[in-house]
Image (spheres, rainbow, N blue to C red):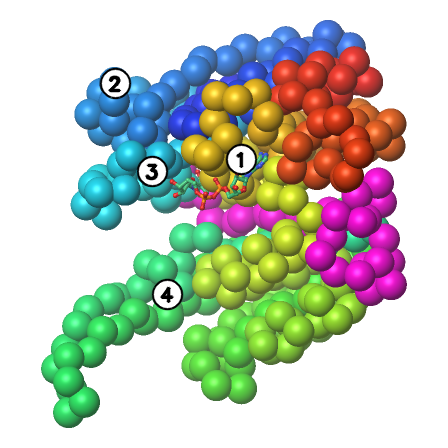
Amino acid sequence: MILNLTLIPGDGIGPEVMGQAVKVLAKVCDKFGHTLKYETHLAGGAAIKERGTFLPDETLAAARKSDAVLFGAVGDFKYDTLPGDQRPENAILKLRKELGLYANLRPAILFKELADSSPVKKEITGGELDIMMVRELTGGIYFGEKGTKETPMGPAAYDVEIYSTEEIRRIAAAAFEIAAKRKKKVTSVDKANVLNSSRLWRSVVIETAKNYPGIELEHIYVDNAAMQLVRNPGHFDVIVTSNMFGDILSDEAGMIAGSLGMLPSASLGNGKFGLYEPAHGSAPDIAGQNKANPMAMILSAAMMLRYSFGLTREADAVENAVKSVLAGGVRTADIVGAGVKPVSTEEAGNLIGQKI
Ligand code: NAD
């Protein structure tokens, strides 16, 4: 198979971790007989510096032409003074919107080798976890009507949570499809006891479930979901929820897995095209020091192999390579225990590559 990719390394540690993911992908292609083709393009602060805009047209055009996009991270404190609509972080929001990527998959995996780096006790996590958070990404309160108005209590501001049946149906369908390949269980998170939009959410999820008779469906209010995630995280397999609830819960679930440096993500739309990126940001505090953990980026590449190319064996090979180096005691600075010497970004990438 020919893998036609657009690479967008971005800012900070983005290029450092991207370099390791490409190295690992090259090994996978060698071993399994595929051809890796890619173009590298600018976004974020790097693009502002070179082209005066956070997302040059050629970056978007290249992304549209490719089978999948690998994205590092964008953002740098030196752009913090720019007006909101000119900041580097807009690059990823615009890419997701322009590319029609409405489903955000954020696995929260606690590898048993890292059980002790979870802030949640081992008796509660069971020492190992694998939760898939499916978050709606292009609708809801982040994109609803916003405004200000005068009220008897003084000036007020509002943001409207709005979902159409089709927006709910397609994200629910995405969650059921994923659940079919996992433990066949979906938990839908809403606030249907209070919100109209959640009541529609729940009814459309129930309707969509009729197309997936083999999948168990349960509903849970978002406040209870936040509690259960730290009380009994093993209860969950696939969680599907709205944009804002997903934003919050995916960070909570992610932290149970230990370090931001371990968390991959995928943003998918209709068809096989997807954008794959680590859940972390550009980490300007450690950029250029060869000490970032490249595993979130490498695991994002594994998700790309699985979801955009249907290459299950290859995706498994990457995930097993990560597990195997962890089992061998290899740790980057963010996950290192007392008395262990951390490896660099490069070394971690090389060691994972060697295990392919
Ligand atoms: P961050 O995720 O960049 O960093 C938070 C902390 O985690 C830092 O201490 C950092 O050193 C550490 N960290 C993150 N990734 C790591 C890795 N792979 N290995 C080791 N340590 C790692 O979040 P932040 O500091 O709040 O934001 C920094 C910049 O990134 C900001 O400009 C922010 O807007 C941007 N950001 C971008 C994205 C994105 O591109 N999708 C996401 C989040 C934040």
Task: Tell me the quarter of the picture where residue 99 sits.
Answer: top left
- Nearer the observer, 195 or 215: 195
Residue at screen point 79% across, 31% down:
340
Q: Is residue 328 left or right of residue 166?
A: right
Q: Does dot 2 land on a helix, a strand or a loop?
A: helix
Residue 27 location (% of width, % of height): 71, 12
- Is label 3's Cβ within 8 Å of ligand 1? yes
Residue ID for mark 4:
141
Q: Does dot 3 land on a helix, a strand or a loop?
A: helix
- Is label 4's Cβ within 8 Å of ligand 1? no
Give the number of the disc on residue 77: 3
- Is label 1's Cβ within 8 Å of ligand 1? yes
**Mark closest to the chain's N terminus, 1 or 4:** 4
Residue at screen point 58% across, 74% down:
222
Identify whether 301 is placed above or below 27.
below
Residue ID for mark 2:
50
Mark 1 vs mark 2, foreground winner is 2
Q: Amino acid at mark 1?
A: Glu
Residue 100 location (% of width, % of height): 41, 43
**Mark closest to the chain's N terminus, 2 or 4:** 2
**Mark closest to the chain's N terminus, 1 or 3:** 3
Identify whether 90 is placed above or below 70.
below
Q: Does dot 1 land on a helix, a strand or a loop?
A: strand
Q: Amino acid at mark 2?
A: Glu
Magenta region: which residues? 98-127
Residue ID for mark 1:
277
